[in-house]
Image (cartoon, rainbow, N blue to C red):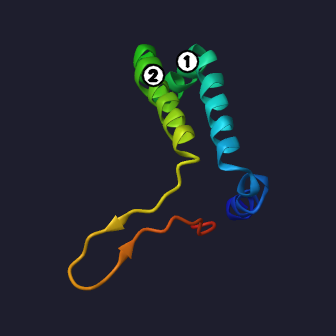
Amino acid sequence: MAVEYAEAAFNGEWRRMAASDRGNLLYALADKIEENIDMMADLESQDSGKPLWFSRDVDIGLVIKCYRYYAGYADKIHGQTIPIAGPHFCYTRMEPVGVVG
């Protein structure tokens, strides 16, 4: 079931959405998490057994930073030329590969 849901999501609206719009949604998610940081930290502390301050300041704080990082990176898709020996041209190519289990 997890693979079916992941495949549906991969082939859904998110894939066809403009990269800047995906970034805006990730920013909005980070903002919502930050607005509810106390509740999220309480849930994380109950789930993990960590002190509330640690869940709030470290775990949830890093989640917010992570979402904002990837939100800013969403529309900056680019490859990179990699120097290698010999008369070769080596580069990275970013493309989705689908659901992996």
In the picture as drawn, the residue positioned furthest to the left comes out as 85
The residue located at (71%, 50%) in the rendering is 18
Secondary structure under badge 2? helix
Place of residue 16 in the rendered image (x, y in percent of width and height, measured from the top left)? 75, 57
For residue 36, say whether it is visible.
no
Reading the chain from its start, which is encountered first: label 1 or label 2?
Answer: 1
Place of residue 101 in the rendered image (x, y in percent of width and height, measured from the top left)? 57, 67
Kindly identify the amino acid type of the residue bearing the numbered disc 2.
Ser
How far is disc 1 from disc 2 in space, using C-alphas? 8 Å
Question: Dot 2 corresponds to which residue?
Answer: 55
The residue located at (73%, 61%) in the rendering is 1
Question: Dot 1 corresponds to which residue?
Answer: 42
Kindly identify the amino acid type of the residue bearing the numbered disc 1.
Asp
| 1 and 2 marks in contact (CB < 8 Å) | yes
Place of residue 14 in the rendered image (x, y in percent of width and height, measured from the top left)? 73, 52
Secondary structure under badge 1? helix
